[in-house]
Image (cartoon, helix red, strand yellow):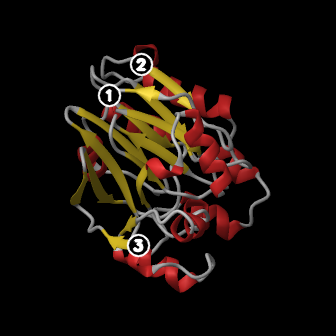
């Protein structure tokens, strides 16, 4: 199984996960052109994509869906709340409703040899979820856009050999930055985003001997930067008492507007 971030940040998100036979996207929050460029880096085309699984209806996760559904006829899976939010917003133009399919939280959908599992997260959207994707004994997880994590989140992600985990902001940068007070409170709240420090704590709770790679994703352009996110998470891991160190696996920062390397599980 392979995993690659096509784009990850507060301005747009799209993650590729696939096996030798089946290929899907988690979110399509960038342009079709950007998605095609990312897929080309993995020697794929849009015709290889079996489905897009959407986490929630915010624009940085869906802005490419209109063209992918109208032009390329790619099916879209999401929760009922997310689907309704997409159609109610009306920002993507006319959408082919027959291509939008519902996945219930805490359930699985199999597409050929991939098993996709949706599980709830706390975010200011209608019915947001995160996903894990399993193929045989391989498992990858994608979790962004959540204000906090708990045992439910950990249990769903446990066993993932590769993960993209949100490291959205540095709390100090956010607090002294130019965002209005209400927006700062939204980001810091239980339906907001994970800070670098909390991201490190979540990763700590997921570490085992089989973890291969962790991508830090959904970084804020205004309230974070690559080195700060990396060093904060690395320090959090190295200071823990779970027996693991950051050098035991690969930690990388997913780029805002260019593909990551292809991670092989």
Look at 57% across and 67% down and name the residue there.
71
Q: Residue 218 location, x and y as percent?
A: 58, 47
**Element under disc 1:** loop
Q: Of the numbered discs in the image, which one, if any, rests on residue 99? A: 3
Is 107 on the left-hand or right-hand side of 224? left
Q: Is residue 78 above or below residue 8?
A: below
Q: Is residue 198 visible?
A: no
Q: CA distance from mark 2 to mark 3?
A: 39 Å
Look at 61% across and 37% down and name the residue there.
259
Q: CA distance from mark 2 to mark 1?
A: 9 Å
- Marks 2, 3: nearer the viewer: 3
> Which residue is the extreme one toward the bottom?
88
Look at 67% across and 52% down and name the residue there.
33
Q: Nearer the viewer, residue 239 or 114?
A: 114
Q: Residue 170 location, x and y as percent?
A: 63, 43
Is 36 on the left-hand or right-hand side of 235? right
Q: In the rendered structure, which disc, 3 or 1, sits on the residue that comes first in sequence?
A: 3
Q: Is residue 79 above or below residue 224?
A: below
Q: In the rendered structure, which disc, 2 or 1, sits on the residue that comes first in sequence?
A: 1
Count the marks. Answer: 3
Q: Of the numbered discs in the image, which one, if any, rests on residue 249? A: 2
Is 143 on the left-hand or right-hand side of 232? left
Q: In the rendered structure, which disc, 2 or 3, sits on the residue that comes first in sequence?
A: 3
Tag 1 residue: 207
């Amino acid at each position: 199984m392979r995993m690659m971030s096509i784009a990850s940040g507060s301005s747009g998100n799209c993650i590729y996960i696939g096996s030798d036979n089946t290929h899907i996207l988690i979110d399509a929050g960038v342009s079709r052109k950007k998605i095609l460029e990312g897929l080309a880096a993995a020697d794929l085309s849009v015709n290889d994509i079996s489905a897009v699984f959407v986490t929630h209806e915010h624009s940085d996760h869906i802005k490419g869906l209109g063209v992918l559904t109208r032009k390329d006829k790619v099916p879209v899976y999401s929760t009922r709340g997310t689907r309704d939010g997409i159609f109610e917003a009306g920002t993507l133009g006319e959408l082919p409703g027959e291509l939008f399919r519902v996945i219930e939280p805490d359930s699985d959908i199999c597409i050929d040899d991939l098993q996709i599992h949706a599980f709830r997260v706390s975010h200011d959207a209608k019915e947001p979820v995160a996903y894990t994707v399993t193929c045989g004994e391989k498992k990858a997880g994608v979790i962004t856009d959540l204000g906090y994590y708990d045992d439910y989140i950990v249990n769903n992600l446990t066993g993932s050999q590769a993960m993209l985990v949100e490291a959205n902001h540095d709390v100090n940068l956010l607090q002294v930055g130019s965002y209005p007070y209400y927006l700062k409170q939204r980001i810091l709240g239980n339906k907001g985003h994970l800070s670098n420090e909390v991201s490190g704590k979540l990763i700590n709770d997921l570490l085992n001997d089989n973890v291969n790679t962790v991508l830090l994703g959904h970084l804020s352009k205004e309230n974070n930067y690559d080195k700060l996110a990396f060093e904060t998470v690395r320090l959090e891991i190295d200071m823990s008492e779970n027996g693991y160190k950051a050098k035991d696996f690969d930690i990388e920062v997913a780029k805002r507007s260019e593909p990551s390397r292809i991670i092989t599980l």
